[in-house]
Amino acid sequence: MKILVLCLIALAIADKFDQFRAFDEDEFGRTLIDTLQMQMSTGEPIARFIEIMRNLETSIENEQKEDDKANNEYQNQCTEDIKILQQESANLERRTVEIQSILDELEPLRSYKQGQADAKNAWKVETEKKLADLVKKRETEKAEFDKKVEEHDYATFVIETVRRMFSDKSQSFLQLNNESQWQKVRDYFINASEQAKKFEIKKSYSKMFNVLAEIASAAQSEDFQNSPTVNRIVNLCDLMLKQIEDSKALETKAEQKRLNMFVLEKGNFDKDLTSLNNALAQLTAAILGLDNRIQDQKRDLADYNARLAAKNKQSEDRGGECREKAYNYQLTREKREQKRQLVSQIIGAFSANQRDFAEYVKLRGQAGDFRGKNFQILGNPTED
């Protein structure tokens, strides 16, 4: 029955209490009304509640002023910190640009030096090949000349030996009969002719010895001591010795000319190789120096890039902290402003409608819930 009566009363005055009920729907507002209700229950003057509300409003405003000041100081410090961090980042970035600029100069220079070195190396290889070909040619010429000298010397030895047979008329040779003497001369030339067939260059000596053998063979019927063939062979031997000597002299002269040319050409190649080796040594040293500088610059660039990334991250983190702080400050400020406005509204409403407000609080208390929850139900009945 009590609940029904209260419901009827609440419905009758619902419109008058709408503003008060709105305060009660806010958690902070309910706390303030609870405070009023406590004071009313203790019999304290209502003016005391107004004083408490005004002090609360002033306290909220002062808190906000202090918070505003602290926030301004914090945000100013944020601005200064970020400015310093951004300046440090700019300095690091400028340094990375400087280092990259140095690398942009060093790396093409290194490539240019390497190109020079490659060209010098190619020239050196070509020069060494030409020198090797020259030395090989010289060795071939020398071997051919030595072979010619050997063949000349053999022919000279053969002819001089036969020449001595006729000139010296040694006792052992004279003791042979006429036919045996000619046969020995013939056999000697035939043997020499067979040996000359093995010559690599002066193969004509074989024919020459063969002719002398035929002459000696044709003279076997003549008296060796008084034969005109002896003088003929001796003259031919003298003529051949002179020809061999002249030929050897020409070959020697040609060989000396070839040797002189070889020494000259080899000297030029040696000079070229010395010059190339010196140039390559300088280029290698220059390239090594550039490699070291490039590696140093790359290490510095990697270090500065890492430092720049870390500094940018630090700046971003600091900016995030500052934005989060500003966001939280704004939320707190809005909530505090809402509380201040609510306090101000309650003060205004209580001052303007003190009797209605006191009645609302009284009815709220009679509803049996100190927090006013059931009274809200009474204002909008949903159950019997």
Image (spheres, helix red, strand yellow):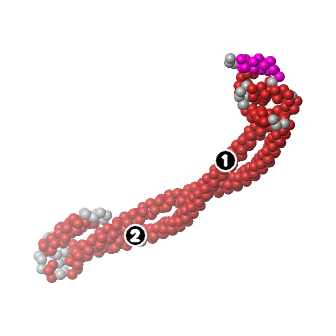
Q: Is residue 325 above or below residue 14?
A: below
Task: Name the residue: 16% across, 75% down.
Answer: 224
Q: Nearer the viewer, residue 372 or 138?
A: 372
- Find residue 28 and report its horizontal and vertical position in percent: 75, 34
Q: In this view, does 47 lie above or below 313?
A: above
Does residue 275 appear in the picture of this structure?
no
Task: Name the residue: 41% across, 65% down.
Answer: 135
State left or right for residue 145 relative to residue 320. left
Q: Which of 211 and 49 is in front in this view?
A: 49
Figure quadrant of the C terminus: top right
Q: Do the residues labelled 2 and 1 touch (CB within 8 Å)?
A: no
- Find residue 338 and report its horizontal and vertical position in percent: 78, 35
- Find residue 134 and report its horizontal and vertical position in percent: 43, 63
The magenta-colored residue range is: 1-16
Q: Nearer the viewer, residue 152 or 265?
A: 265
Name the amino acid type tagged 2: Glu
